[in-house]
Amino acid sequence: MKTYCKNVDICSDEHLAAAYDDFARRHRRRPEFAPFFDMEPSEVFARVRGMVGARTLDVEPIAYFWRTEPTNGKKRLIGREGPMQQFLDHICVMAMQELFDAKVMFHQCASVPGKGQKHAKKYLERWVRDPRQKYYVKLDVKKYYPSVKRAVLFSMLERDVANPDLVWLVEALVSTHRSGINIGSYLSQFLANYYLSGAVRYACEARRTRKGRDGSEKPEKLVDHVLTYMDDWYLSGHDKANLKAAVRKVVGYMKNVLGLTVKEWKLCVIDVEPVDMVGFVFWRFKTVIRAGIFKRARRAIMRANRARCITPHMAARVIAYWGFFKVTATRRFRDRHNLGALVVECCRVISATLKDAKAAALAFALLVAFA
């Protein structure tokens, strides 16, 4: 069996420097990370090498807090890791990129660069509008991140990764999580896709043997299309019986092999029930915004329109929701609320705010230099 990451040295200067640069680009401006970045990179690298060599992880305890999703009211336990642990996450992710590229399937979206909502929307729209597609099933794994079985995950890593230092570091980091894998960890989002990659491949390759009238046997795919957005699944096909059989196989695989529980599911007819996924609702003839997101977006737009002076916070909200309106059937709403001109004004507000912030930072730096 092919193994990966065998030629990666996670303690080399090149790898640590690349991971440090990526980590600094994302987090250097965060005030709570100032003590970490006050240390010299060589000192940070020495600490990492010491932990890997001694097989002892020395990181701050993870701080947990509850967060309620504004759109659906779900409560999620989020873990905020310390700077050193987040840097170690970046080291592991960069080292395992070869593994993720090989194992994670093409239509596994979320947490993969270039494969977010835009990728999922493109293909879901294409499949829903294909007249040959008649039925679909949506699956949702119950409490996916906390339900990940570490023993199964570690056995997968030991099977696929031929790098003892890397395997130890990943297992040590995951072992600090309260249960399963931590929501909020940079490493967890990549491991989540990797953990489900076998189930996605199993669904894509599920087949049955159909006998012809002449007695010949011909293999037939059970499902036409599979797309996942983290733990949300979309499976579609033209044959009702085959699609049901494929879903039963996938649910059984996730239960028996991965130890995951799938919520109750039902087979839907595309012409009758639209597909609600990744923030959009897909019909045969149009794509609209999910009702909860549209309500929040409309509120943000109307507040900005009524405001005498648009604040940076208002502008950022409008720009964030603008992406939904650009790619959906909402022209009447855009014209009624003059959304194009509002977005231009919001962009001007954000640009001016960033320029003021840069000027203030430069003035402070000069003041400190000549004090």
Image (cartoon, helix red, strand yellow):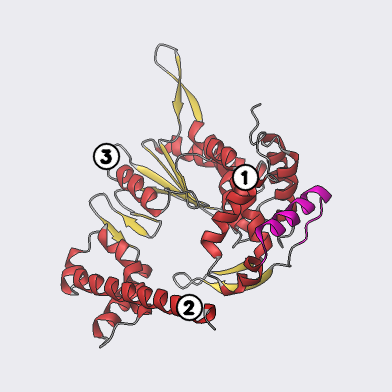
The numbered mark, 1 or 2, whose residue comes first in the sequence reads: 1
User: Which amino acid does the dot numbered 1 rest on?
Assistant: Glu
User: Which amino acid does the dot numbered 2 rest on?
Assistant: Leu
Q: Position of residue 9 (x, y in %)?
A: 68, 40
Marks 3 and 1 sit apart, C-alpha to C-alpha, by: 52 Å
The kind of secondary structure element at disc 2 is helix
Residue of label 3? 131
The picture quadrant where one finds residue 218 is top left
What number of labels is visible? 3
Residue bounds of the magenta highlight: 39-58
Q: Residue at the location (65% across, 31% down)? A: 3
**The residue positioned farthest toward the right in the image shown:** 54
Residue of label 1? 14
Vertical order, 207 against 85 (above or below): above
The numbered mark, 3 or 1, whose residue comes first in the sequence reads: 1
* Main secondary-structure element of the magenta-colored stretch: helix
The numbered mark, 2 or 3, whose residue comes first in the sequence reads: 3
The picture quadrant where one finds residue 274 is bottom left
Left or right of 268 in this view: 153: right
Q: Position of residue 289 (x, y in %)?
A: 31, 62
**The residue positioned farthest toward the bottom in the image shown:** 308
Magenta region includes residue 109: no
Marks 2 and 3 sit apart, C-alpha to C-alpha, by: 65 Å
Q: Position of residue 63 (x, y in %)?
A: 68, 71
The label on residue 366 is: 2
